[in-house]
Image (cartoon, rainbow, N blue to C red):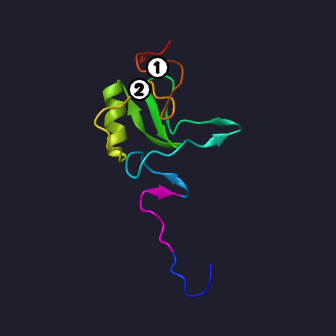
Amino acid sequence: MKAGEPVAAPKADTVGDEPIALGMRGRRGGRMLGRMKRAPVIVHPPCTGGRRVTLYGQDLGRALRPGDVAAILRRAGFCATTFVWDDTGVFEWRDGGPDVWLMP
């Protein structure tokens, strides 16, 4: 950067180079772990109190059904009216998909 050049302000919806929520400024790819892309939204295995939902590692809350996941993501800034649960570029479902909510 040269002296006198304007300095770009950080985007309000990012933390570092990761978006806080998808849908605000377009979808970005997940983080790279080795050669695999990691989905930004992880719905963790069922446990007592529901399934934990994280976005880029930040805990957003617990869900007891897919509608709860949608509500949690909307509170985090997603502007989608519907979600495609099997979109592996966005969601990673651990120990069962959107139809598994009880502990094994």
| Residue, disc 2 | 85
Give the prevailing secondary structure in the magenta stretch. Answer: loop
Numbered range of the magenta stretch: 8-15
User: Which residue is at the far top?
Assistant: 104
Q: Residue at x 60, y 43 (%)?
A: 31
User: Please, what is the three-letter code of the amino acid marked with disc 2?
Assistant: Trp
Depth-wise, is mark 2 or mark 1 nearer the camera? Answer: 2
Quarter of the view holding residue 29:
top right
Screen quadrant of the N terminus: bottom right
Check disc 1 and report its element: helix, strand or loop.
Answer: loop
User: Which numbered dot is residue 97?
Assistant: 1
User: Please, what is the three-letter code of the amino acid marked with disc 1?
Assistant: Gly
Quarter of the view holding residue 63:
top left
Q: Residue at x 48, y 35 (%)?
A: 90
| Mark 2 neighbour density, 10 Å: few (under 14) some (14–19) many (20 or more) | some
User: Which residue is at the far bottom?
Assistant: 4
Left or right: 19 as drawn, with respect to 73: right
